[in-house]
Image (cartoon, rainbow, N blue to C red):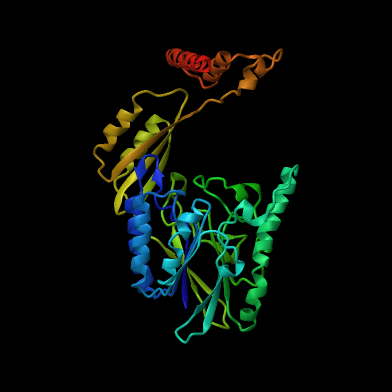
């Protein structure tokens, strides 16, 4: 039996104002083809199906169209868990209907914990593998709030709660383990020893504490994780893995080699884990330097290796805000149709003083009025005089409007 592990699709994701729908559709088309070509039996999606708890109609269509098409492939079971970006109610809404298509959705922790344990049978009606489908564990799932507890106590309680949740699934699977049946668990969390990308947002549980690899029960033969977008092992352990996101969700992921993982399961034998590279549908390119260096680097780009035109992030290192750079770069790129959009980030090369550094030691920051604080903030950012004057006029106007609103 072959099981495919993927995660963090983030359907509906934008890069600033730009849609990623075309890239996601191309990935899902590729995935359907891969499943059929490689005779995949079970598909595991380890959370963050959507980028938002309130996905757009377009994102929902991508999702349901895929599920409708996957039943026509070799895949006999689909198991989907909720991630921190997913709405439990949105994922669970069609749950009963999808079960008729052998699609199991665990949007959040069910009242009956045993619903997370899904035995998978082969063509001879024998249980060949058991999936412990654990979704993203929200605060209410793993702990009770305790008034007055410290940050350290809360962190320890969360770690213990996550570990206990997995331990509670061990007794029901022991019968299968005695029969030599492999058990695969899922999770959507931040495991200690893993490396996040810039695009990972802090999550409530993950920002407080990272569960260690040793806290997962040893009875699990493989742990299919979601949440981190970079494909990787946890603590160099082959059986605990993040599949990563299928497309680069930000420029910080531009050098990641995206992949899906295929687990070959054979009763009584060790699992075989193979990674398969996902094609790059749109190349994200990140360049950094001063203005002349950036221009030279752009000129040297003669082609990109992706089906869709590339998007370019330019990190301009500068001592002060540069005017008209957008037009200059646009002029150079007008002769490069294989680059569709560019994103300019101006990064100051000077050390920015904090407000506290600028305040005389004789008085505290709290002693300053809002206008003085705003002026010092402009100074800390090296804003030139003309721009500073315009900003100050706008600030004064905003303050007057707020004062007027208070009096009305």
Is residue 350 at least partly visible in the picture?
Answer: yes
Residue at x-position 46% and y-position 64%: 95
- In the image as oriented, which residue stretches furthest toward the bottom? 124
Tell me where residue 394 appears, x and y as whole percent: 44, 16
Q: Tell which of 337 and 80 is nearer to you.
A: 80
Q: Tell which of 127 and 110 is nearer to you.
A: 110
Residue at x-position 40% and y-position 53%: 11
Tell me where residue 113 appears, x and y as whole percent: 61, 66
Tell me where residue 104 appears, x and y as whole percent: 47, 68
The correct choice, above or below, for 106 with respect to 229 in the image is: below
The correct choice, above or below, for 343 with respect to 52 in the image is: above
Is residue 230 at least partly visible in the picture?
Answer: no
Q: Tell which of 350 and 210 is nearer to you.
A: 210
Residue 142 left/right relative to 65: right
Residue at x-position 65% and y-position 47%: 208
The correct choice, above or below, for 297 with respect to 22 in the image is: above
Residue at x-position 26% and y-position 41%: 336
Kindly indicate the quadrant of the structure image that contains residue 333: top left
């Amino acid at each position: 039996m072959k099981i495919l592990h993927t995660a963090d699709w983030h359907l509906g994701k934008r890069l600033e104002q730009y849609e990623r729908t075309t890239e996601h559709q191309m990935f899902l088309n590729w995935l359907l083809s891969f499943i059929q070509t490689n005779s995949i039996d079970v598909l595991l999606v380890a959370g963050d199906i959507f980028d938002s708890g309130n996905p757009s109609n377009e994102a929902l269509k991508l999702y349901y169209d895929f599920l409708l098409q996957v039943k026509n492939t070799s895949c006999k079971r689909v198991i989907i868990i909720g991630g921190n970006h997913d709405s439990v109610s949105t994922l669970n809404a069609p749950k009963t209907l999808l079960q008729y298509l052998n699609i199991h959705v665990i949007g959040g922790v069910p009242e009956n914990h045993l619903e997370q344990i899904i035995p998978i049978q082969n063509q001879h009606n024998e249980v060949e593998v058991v999936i412990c489908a654990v979704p993203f564990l929200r605060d209410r799932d793993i702990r009770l709030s305790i008034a007055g507890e410290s940050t350290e106590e809360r962190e320890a309680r969360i770690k213990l709660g996550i570990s206990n949740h997995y331990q509670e699934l061990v007794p029901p699977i022991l019968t299968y383990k005695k029969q030599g049946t492999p058990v695969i668990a899922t999770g959507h969390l931040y495991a200690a020893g893993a490396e996040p990308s810039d695009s990972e947002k802090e999550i409530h549980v993950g920002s407080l504490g990272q569960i260690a690899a040793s806290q997962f029960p040893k009875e699990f033969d493989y742990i299919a994780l979601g949440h981190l977008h970079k494909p990787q092992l946890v603590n160099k352990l082959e059986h605990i893995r993040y599949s990563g996101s299928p497309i680069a969700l930000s420029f910080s992921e531009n050098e990641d080699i995206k992949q899906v993982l295929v687990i070959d399961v054979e009763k009584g034998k060790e699992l075989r884990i193979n990674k398969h590279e996902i094609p790059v549908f749109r190349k994200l390119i990140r360049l950094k330097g001063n203005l002349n260096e950036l221009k030279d680097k752009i000129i040297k780009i003669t082609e990109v290796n992706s089906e869709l035109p590339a998007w370019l992030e330019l990190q301009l290192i500068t001592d002060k805000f540069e005017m008209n750079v957008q037009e200059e770069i646009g002029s150079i790129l007008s002769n490069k149709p294989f680059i569709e959009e560019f994103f300019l980030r101006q990064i100051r090369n000077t050390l920015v003083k904090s407000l506290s550094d600028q305040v005389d030691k004789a008085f505290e920051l709290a002693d300053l009025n809002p206008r003085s604080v705003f002026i010092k903030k402009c100074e800390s950012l090296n804003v030139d005089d003309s721009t500073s004057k315009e900003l100050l006029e706008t600030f004064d106007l905003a303050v007057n409007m707020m004062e007027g609103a208070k009096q009305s």
